[in-house]
Image (tube, rainbow, N blue to C red):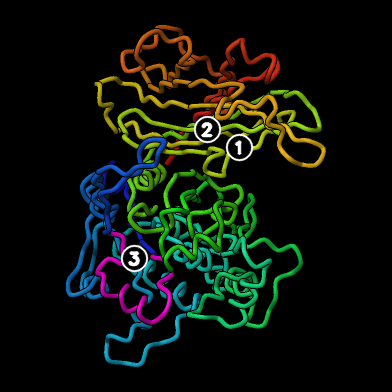
Amino acid sequence: MTQSQQLPVVYVRGYAGGQSGIDGAVADPFYGFNAGSTHIRIGQENKPGFYQFEGPLLRLHKDLQYQILVEGSQQVYLDTQATVPRNTVWIHRFYDPSASTWGAKPEEFRMEDAARDLLELIDKVTAKSGAPRVHLVAHSMGGLICRCLIQKILPDAGREPTDCVADLFTYGTPHGGITFDLGFGVLERLRDAIGINGAEIFGRERMYQYLTPGAGKDDEPPKGWDPRVMPAGDGQPFAFPLSRVFCLVGTNPQDYDVAHGLSSAAVGARSDGLVQIDNAYVPGAQRAYVHRSHSGRYGLVNSEEGYQNLRRFLFGDLKVHAALVDHRLQETADTTWQAEVTLSIRGLQIVMHERTSAQWCPVQLPFAAPDPGGVALATTFLDTDLVSPNGSDAMRYALHLRILSLREHDDGLFDFGDHVEQTADFDDILVVDVGADAGGLQVWATWKSVIGGSLRDYVPTNAALTDQDPDRGEWVADVSLPDTTARILGEDARIRLTVTAWN
């Protein structure tokens, strides 16, 4: 990728809390985007091991030659230079006016002000770099600042969001607000009424005000309004394409130790310790689930999982989507079906995407596959510029698929009479190799159960899959499931692979 193809990256940090938290945030030159880690969770017993991740800022510099330009401050550098390179990273230091460490009275933080200042930064960076747009990368509340810009500030100014923003990547953003398992809604109402440390920004009423064009400080959301939803649609004014939004969802609450664990206890197990899983994504957007906490030693931002998803989404050139199509499960009133999915890419020591029952995020399976498209299992992005570690021209990923059934008594309790713990009705790995030659894209797919020997030694010898309709503008092929699945998923069930050009 040449510099002329790169776009500036603007990073927007998350919520800092009260005055001491804000003062601590502004003391960091890069607002946390430089933070790395040395711990990783390994094994079924969840024991930690050593794994050094340098941090996303340094990795963008090392891997893609992005520059971090500072001369007293990044703002001073921007103001004093006639031009700046496109391959640069910029930190939106929106908390600086609210700090008490500069000797002046701190200003009150407001989402709308932070979003307007973000637009000013973007306009200055694009004007001086010649780049048409920027990539927005945000953690937690930072994603809501970006959405305030996209959904309110730009439309209120009569400007199309796609004219200045290319992509939005969010780590653990509470797109649906912050809600609690405890208190039956009392904690949320108390928080929104009192506004301790400005935390009412995570409640529906305040979110409606800063996510809705034309909304004022006294406006209330209509019944049924979902804060997660971003306006989208072909030809709709001021809509931002959901395909250009990626939400990284954390599923590890136990390692979020803020408030001595009280936060994760209140939010509940189905969360990253602060943001519940169902609130951490925009419906219709790209997303991946990783077993990481909201922040800390095992946090989302300072993780290899987060960086690899970020890098491939922003700079990859292929999008690969896998779906279960035309399945038909045994339809009984007392049975619930779920799929567990794990996605790994050759050469990486981490899992890119993981949805399991143990992490409270399995894929719920309807008795019959919805049409069209079936049930989405995983989407990943690949970069053909990345050399395979074994010298192969093909990129390989493995989709581990498990199908489980749970039965209930009439009283709603699970039936354990014939249950075998951790044992799936179907368990196999689809090994997919993606390459290209002079004739175009080539894809091979094989189930691990039919591969003899070690996977590392496996080289596809079967014929490449055939594109079902070369005129569609995307590559599509179906992969048959092993014969043993016919009694579980039906004879017509298949895995549909769709590969499209990206970026």
Structural distance between the alpha carbons of marks 3 and 2: 44 Å
**Disc 3 target residue:** 127
Mark 1 is on which residue type? Val
Helix, strand or loop at disc 3? Answer: helix
Magenta span = 13-33
* Picture residue at 36% right of the left edge, 52% below the top: 298
- For residue 46, which quarter of the picture? top left
In the displayed orientation, state which residue is furthest to the front. Answer: 417
Relative to 311, 502 lies left or right: right
Marks 1, 3: nearer the viewer: 1
Residue 80: quadrant of the picture: bottom left
Which residue in the protein does label 1 denote?
363
Mark 2 → mark 1, Cα distance in angstroms: 8 Å
CB within 8 Å, label 2 to label 1: yes
Disc on res. 341: 2
Please tell me whether residue 489 belongs to the stretch shown in magenta. Answer: no
Residue at the image position 56 percent from the left and 17 percent from the top: 479
User: At 52% from the left edge and 25% from the top edge, which residue is drawn?
Assistant: 475
**Residue 105 seen in this snapshot:** yes
